Image (tube, rainbow, N blue to C red):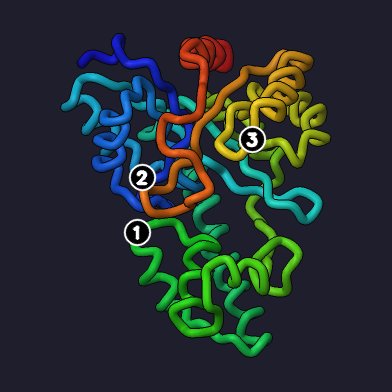
């Protein structure tokens, strides 16, 4: 089946290269089974899985990978994610940018472990690193280590007691603000989009001034009314309206929609490509 006969777009999915359950190749196969025509690989702070996904998609010949990254930033003690779409994932400048954010994750994890130790719930860094494997270390890996060490009964408890932004072991990202992330994304010729923005809409005007191009309006956790609010906001500022499931796996993130189930308009892909051409 060619991509022309497929009717689904999902621009927000994760692989084992960050905190997803499935390898890039497996994710491509799941997307094909779900009739996805355009699949956005948006791993956290790394481009390491994109080439593998692109190769798998090319072998299949019936879907297109939209290469992306989900960069992690902090603003006013709130974690904010900025998506970079249509990144040149083999260009040294892009690879270096992702490495900067990835290194920030490593330092952040070490600081979180120090806080946990001070709280009397020690976790070994080697345990966290083993859970993360080749992925960029993040809070889900620390949460898993807490669970395996017997300090919490569930992953959610790890966040509720220690790792959420208002809890005692939380550590802000030191790598960049969302405004800097937008500027750096544009500097490498990619398209900056604010991820799952419903709770941080007040930052949108300032991000637009920094060069923001789009809002993730169609998102797994947003109902139809919330999506319409975000579409109206995007139109107010002349922003693209993107979307996706934030898919992490068939057995993870159960509150998220399955891959391809968020109703993202097909035309957004062409609009992203047009936006990238203008950035260049």
Q: Position of residue 60 (x, y in %)?
A: 18, 26
Task: Classify mark 1: helix, strand or loop.
Answer: loop
Lateral position of residue 147 relative to residue 36, left or right? right
* Residue nearest the viewer, comparing 269 with 212: 269
- Determine which of the numbered discs, if any, sits on residue 48 in the image: 2
| Identity of the residue drawn at 78% across and 34% down | 201
- Determine which of the numbered discs, if any, sits on residue 143 in the image: none
Q: Is residue 211 visible?
A: no
Residue at the bottom extreme? 120
Residue picked out by circle 3: 222
Q: Quadrant of residue 170?
A: bottom right
Label 1 with label 2: CB-CB less than 8 Å: yes
Mark 2 neighbour density, 10 Å: few (under 14) some (14–19) many (20 or more) = many
Mark positioned earlier in the residue sequence (2 or 3):
2
Mark 3 neighbour density, 10 Å: few (under 14) some (14–19) many (20 or more) = some
Residue picked out by circle 1: 134
Residue 176 higher or lower than 88, as above or below: below
Q: Nearer the viewer, mark 2 or mark 3?
A: 3
Lateral position of residue 144 relative to residue 50, left or right? right
Residue at the front extreme? 224
Task: Classify mark 3: helix, strand or loop.
Answer: loop
């Amino acid at each position: 089946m060619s991509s022309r006969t497929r009717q689904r777009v999902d621009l927000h999915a994760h692989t084992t290269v960050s905190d997803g359950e499935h390898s890039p190749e497996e994710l491509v196969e799941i997307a094909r089974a779900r009739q996805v025509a355009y699949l956005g690989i948006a791993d956290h702070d790394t481009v390491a899985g994109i080439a593998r996904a692109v190769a798998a998609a090319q072998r299949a010949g019936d879907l297109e990978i939209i290469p992306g990254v989900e960069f992690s930033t902090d603003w006013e003690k709130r974690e904010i994610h900025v998506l970079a779409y249509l990144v040149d994932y083999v260009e040294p400048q892009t690879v270096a940018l992702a490495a900067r954010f990835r290194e920030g994750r490593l330092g952040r994890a070490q600081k979180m472990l120090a806080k946990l130790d001070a709280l009397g719930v020690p976790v070994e860094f080697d345990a966290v690193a083993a859970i993360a494997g080749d992925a960029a270390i993040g809070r889900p890996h620390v949460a898993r280590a807490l669970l395996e060490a017997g300090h919490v009964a569930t992953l959610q408890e790890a966040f509720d007691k220690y790792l959420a932004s208002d809890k005692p072991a939380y550590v802000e990202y030191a790598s960049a603000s969302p405004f800097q992330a937008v500027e750096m994304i544009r500097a490498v010729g990619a398209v900056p989009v604010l991820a799952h923005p419903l709770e941080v809409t007040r930052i949108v005007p300032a991000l637009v001034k920094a060069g923001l191009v789009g809002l993730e309006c169609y998102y797994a956790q947003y109902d139809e009314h919330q999506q319409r609010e975000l579409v109206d906001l995007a139109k107010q500022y002349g922003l693209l309206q993107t979307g996706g499931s934030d898919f992490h796996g068939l057995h993870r993130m159960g509150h998220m929609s399955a891959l391809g189930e968020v109703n993202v308009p097909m035309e957004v892909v062409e609009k992203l490509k047009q936006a990238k051409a203008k950035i260049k």
